[in-house]
Amino acid sequence: MSSPSSNHSEEREQGSAFMPRFDGAGLLTAIAVDSASKDILMVAFMDAEALAKTRASGLAHFHSRSRGKLWLKGETSGHFLRVEEMRVDCDQDALVMLCRPEGPACHTGAPSCFYRKLEGDTLVRV
């Protein structure tokens, strides 16, 4: 006999209902990927508000852990991320957003936040 929590888990993992699973801080991981090149642009976090605003507007919104508030990617730089598709992982605690970037994704001006690779103990620009 299955328990209500296992039914809930099975529905989350196998069903068609969107049931995002936020962590203890109310966040889920959001990975932005360039829809054309498939390069990883950035990793950030979404709370329920950021997720709702992203879905409603088509523009990536995130929860800033350092500032403790909602932010629209590109609100000050103009480098918006237009979300074309959202993919949800198996237990619904992470999203991959296929995006069309309108400028560099990284606050450093790099096209992606992943602009260095680790070689031994040294970071080297790619």
Image: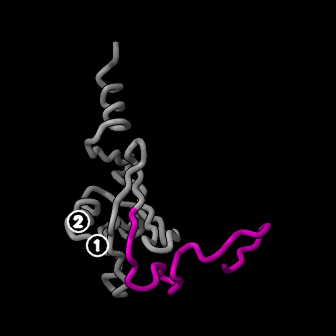
Q: What label sits on residue 113 in the rendered view?
A: none
Q: What label sits on residue 59 in the rendered view?
A: 1
Q: Is residue 20 left or right of residue 95?
A: left
Magenta region: which residues?
Answer: 97-126
Mark 2 secondary-structure assignment: helix
Question: CB atoms at circles 1 and 2 under 8 Å apart?
Answer: yes
Please state the horizontal and vertical placement of residue 32, each as a whole percent of the image: 43, 67
Q: Residues within 10 Å of mark 1 (few under 14, many from 20)?
A: many
Please state the horizontal and vertical placement of residue 14, each as a whole percent of the image: 36, 36
Q: Residue furthest top?
A: 1
User: Residue drawn 60% across and 77% down?
Assistant: 115
Q: Residue furthest right?
A: 120
Q: Which residue is mark 2?
A: 53
Q: Residues within 10 Å of mark 2 (few under 14, many from 20)?
A: some
Q: Residue furthest left?
A: 56
Q: Is 78 within the magenta?
A: no
User: Residue drawn 42% across and 70% down?
Assistant: 35
